[in-house]
Image (cartoon, rainbow, N blue to C red):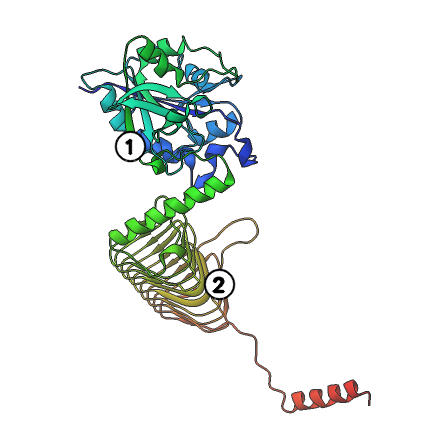
Amino acid sequence: MTNPIAAVILAAGKGTRMKSDLHKVLHPIAGRPMLLHLMASVDALNPTKKVVIVGDKADQLEAALAGSADLAVQDPQLGTGHAVQQAEQALAGFDGDVLILYGDVPFVPTATMQAMIDRLNAPDAPAVVVLAFEPADAQQYGRVITEGDRVTKMVEHKDATDAERAVRLCNSGLMAAKARDLFALLSRVTDDNAAKEYYLVDIVNIANADRRHCAVVKTDPYDVAGINSRGELAAMEGEWQARRRVSAMAEGASLIAPDTVWFAWDTELGRDVTVEPNVFFGPGVKVSDGVKIRANSHIEGAIIGAGCEVGPFARLRPGTILGEKAKIGNFVEVKKATLGKGAKANHLTYLGDATIGAGANIGAGTITCNYDGYFKYKTEIGENAFIGSNSALVAPVKIGRDAIVAAGSAVTRDVADGELRLVRGEQLVKPGWADRFHDAMRKKKAGK
């Protein structure tokens, strides 16, 4: 039987280095707020309780979390230990394992969290488990001094001796402890330091002083990378994208120029998908097997069926559904529209709020006129219909199966199955008019 798990996520900081009106932990990576990346990993543990410690811009966090976690306010903000203490009321009566996480450290894997919980429940029963890492450059990180996997001392960089600074094992700030131990230890932390703050790391030294022991779990530096500035946000985005590209290719997709392809957090690619250079995936994209996505395409909120071809220079917006072997060509924009099997719009077209039947052909320059300034309306195009170039389909309108709309038509009424619709003004012919016009204008320009 496993113990219940609670997660306490610290997100009360002002994030001043971001210089933003948006809360730091809500800045997105791969199209998803960093806090929600972390919450998804936490949710995979099926926690009994989640408590987010808030302070600055608490209303933004409340809206983003949408009731998925309890909120506890830290005001004033007196350090990390003080922040965790604010969760005590929300965890009243909880007798299980507590994970302490940070909203600006978004990519802690679920497996790493589980490793911390497992170590906490090992037979030797450590009072606190510390998550540590070995960066290439230890910089100003606090050090974790160990014997084996037992922590003998936690020391801030500024307080460390030269020998301690030579230790490469650094404190991530993430910890795990039994709820009954955690808050008992926190109650004994003091602000007897230069910053007059209550430091979370002090619970380790207090436990050691009580002749209890604490343990360390090690992880990859990427897993515990914190984000405090726009530069660090961009660097983490780059690292996330690089890893995602590697996994996409390992799973059977071909990226012609990997560094130029950008994924969203939930992009799904099938086998034998080919992605040409400079393709951007926004959230909500699912690509089936055998699809070819040509260069310079922007795709979000779209479902692309097997064997489709998209682009180059195509834009698929949310609500787009492409049936098997449909084709969207260059400079075509599709929004909230479904194309049936084998339907195609090869170039220079806008299809919005539309249903297009299997085998239909949409000519260049076609526009579904779906908006009257107040409401959106739907266009329905039947199977194997042919829409001639430079046609305007003024919704709501239905084009029947096997119907033909002649090039240059502005269609405002339904077209029946098998019908030809030709909507053009009368074509006038005036022989010699152009020659006379040019002669007159040349003389006028010459001043004669």
Tell me where residue 24 appears, x and y as whole percent. 49, 33
Q: Position of residue 417 (x, y in %)?
A: 36, 67
Mark 1 or 2: the one toward you: 1
Q: Secondary structure at mark 2?
A: strand
What residue is shown at x 55% (from left), y 31% (from top)? 16
User: What is the quadrant of residue 155 in the picture?
Assistant: top left
Q: Residue at (33%, 68%) from the top-left corner?
A: 384
Determine which quarter of the picture holds residue 360: bottom left
The residue where tag 2 is placed is 367
Q: CA distance from mark 1 to mark 2?
A: 47 Å
The circle on residue 290 is: none
Residue 110 image label: 1
Position in image of residue 112 (x %, y %)? 28, 31
Mark closer to the chain start, 1 or 2 = 1
Q: Nearer the viewer, residue 124 or 402?
A: 124
**Which part of the image, by quadrant, shows the C terminus?**
bottom right
Local SS, label 1: helix
Residue at 38%, 49% in the rendered image: 263
- Does 76 sit above or below residue 389? above
Q: Amino acid at mark 1?
A: Thr
The correct choice, above or below, for 120 with respect to 394 in the image is above
> In the rendered image, is residue 68 in sight?
no
